[in-house]
Amino acid sequence: MRYKRAAAARQKGVKSVCAACARSKKRIRTDGKKDCILIVDDEPEIRQLLVGYLTRNGFEAIAARDGREMWQALDRHVIDLVVLDLMLPDTDGLTLCRDLRAKSAIAILMLTARGEETDRILGIEMGADDYLVKPFNPRELLARIKSILRRTRALPPNLRPEQARCLCFAGWCLDTATRLLTAADGVVTPLSGGEYRLLRILLDHPNRVLNRDQLTEMIHGREAEAYDRAIDVQVSRLRQRLRDDSREPELIKTVRGEGYVLAASVDRRAACA
């Protein structure tokens, strides 16, 4: 029966993985709780295979078959990362990704059967932290999940906590503890992991031109080669968060042939008002 499930799942877009490869050290959070992964996919074989595989590898895993069940699961559980299929029966994954990102900074890994670069970039534009093209090996999914969680929680050296909790610039305030961005009119916006890291880098280097390679390396580190064009998408999303006109930006400016620069002074405060 186990081999029948594996064969069925392979046909649906998940490659089989041997039992020996599935056994590895359990990954436990420092607070003693397991990371909880939500699998959103309309194929029962994929849901069953991935929930079992992630559970064996030290995660808590739950599943949802569509957008409605996804929102229900998010209401009932503390979710650390959502694995979201692009093709769903009720609402497409891109719309769900956009709506989820507008409400939360939960990490999102998009699954797609379409491998074209435009589709991958579109997923990042909607707020996904990473993407994986079907068919895929569960071991690669596991590696990407760990990588996303590691990037989300472990800041690069230049982004480590400091005495200044609140960074204020051009009428905006970023709370580095809650990762909430507050506008001058009081509107509060949650940032995704990638948006937060990019903004922190720009705030740590105000009025200094940073090229794409520098930004990509500081955000993604050794995995930078997989994000050759993602930095432009992240800059575009961050501009939207900051209400900065992408055609004539005044805050995050493009320096042709060089990179990007945050054209603002930064006031570092011990606490946010």
Image: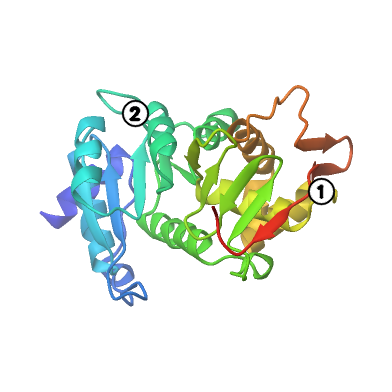
Q: Position of residue 2 (x, y in %)?
A: 15, 56
Structure colour scheme: rainbow
Residue 85 sits in quarter: top left
Q: As drawn, which residue projects farthest toward the right?
A: 257
SS label for mark 1: loop
Q: Position of residue 254 (x, y in %)?
A: 81, 35
Which residue lies under the disc numbered 2?
Answer: 87
Measured along the vertical axis of the image, is residue 130 above or below residue 56? above
Q: Position of residue 117 (x, y in %)?
A: 59, 33
Residue drawn at x 53%, y 60% is 151
**Amino acid type at mark 2:** Met
Q: As drawn, which residue projects farthest toward the left?
A: 1
Foreground residue among 12 and 79: 79
Residue drawn at x 51%, y 45% is 191
Which residue lies under the disc numbered 1?
Answer: 211
In the image: residue 261, left or right of residue 216? right
Can residue 113 be seen by looking at this rendering? no
In the image: residue 20, left or right of residue 111? left
Mark number, residue 167: none
Query: Does the residue at mark 1 contact the one at mark 2 (Cβ under 8 Å)?
Result: no
